Image (cartoon, helix red, strand yellow):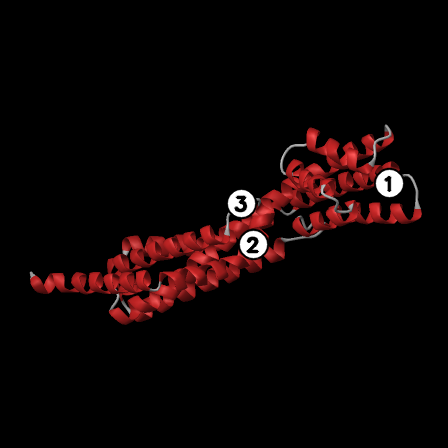
Amino acid sequence: MVAALAPYAIVLGVIGTIGLSVIATWDRVERALEKFAGGFGVDIDRADLGLSAQRIGAILGVASGLLWFALIVVLHPDILNALLYVPMAFAAVAFGFRTWIRGKVAKRLKAFNDQFELVLRLISSGLRVGLSLRQAVALVIEESPEPARTEFARVIARASIGVPMDVALDDLVKRVPSDELQMFVDAIDIQSKTGGNLAKILDHLANTIKARRSIQRKVRSLTGEARASGWVIAALPVGLGVFIMATQPPMREAMFTTPIGHLSLITFVVLEVVGAGLVKAMMRLDV
């Protein structure tokens, strides 16, 4: 009975030791986490999540601890491997968090680009009835949904405190990296230097964006079968692995309890991620 409980006592002792060490050095750990989380600042701003570096650091630290504890419970490693799982758990959580953030950024950027044709037509309409550029941009805030409303509200807010309109729009391009938005800002910059009918220029730009969206939809339809095949190819190894683990207990035990099994799992995950990324890159067509 005592011998059977010994591994669990060792694991609890390791967890307690690491916990006490973290508590004793928490200030340094917190500063390191905040410094690391600062690298997410640009993407956090683009996703408009409103998370501070301190909060991101706390999320990463807690999630890493929970993942590490889950690995200890499931894999029952020795003390050396348990310590090696700490950086692995943190790296996995950081990668997952960055992937989630970039997904939110991509979703918000797509929503902004989908609304941008309407934004251009609103600004063009405002200019045609005699509004200034700043007043026409303010019209976007009243008539457009999110995220265009928030992004152009930031532009007006900066312009209201004395920042030149062209500088505020350049900052918008940095926050929302869009080729179409860059063309809009370039058109305003050129028109301010050379003159011309800005409303007409924006109408032409809106028509170009509309045609571009039509081509993108056609390309997506034509490549739908290839993209579906890519997802199936990426899912086959995962499904086969789950089936083998469910039907072959000895292989499952070897995979989760031996160093060679752990190395095989890590290799599988790395190759799966690389393969999925390559398939996604092959299916991406820029129009």
Q: Residue furthest front?
A: 161
Indicate the quadrant where residue 267 lies. bottom left
> Of callouts 2 and 3, which one flags the residue occurring earlier in the amino acid sequence?
2
Determine which residue is flagged by label 3.
50
**Residue at 41% in and 59% down:** 30
Element type where label 3 sits in the image: loop
Instruction: Indicate the amino acid at tag 2.
Output: Gly
Neighbor class of circle 3 (other Cα within 10 Å; few <14, some 14-19, many 20+) is: few
Instruction: Indicate the amino acid at tag 3.
Output: Gly
Determine which residue is flagged by label 2.
41
Residue 285 drawn above or below residue 82? above
Indicate the quadrant where residue 266 lies. bottom left
**Residue at 49% in and 61% down:** 35
256 horizontally vs 125: left or right: left
User: Residue 136 in the image: x percent, y percent?
Assistant: 78, 34
User: Residue 16 in the image: x percent, y percent?
Assistant: 24, 61
Element type where label 2 sits in the image: helix
Determine which residue is flagged by label 1.
201
**Residue at 57% in and 57% down:** 279
Element type where label 1 sits in the image: helix
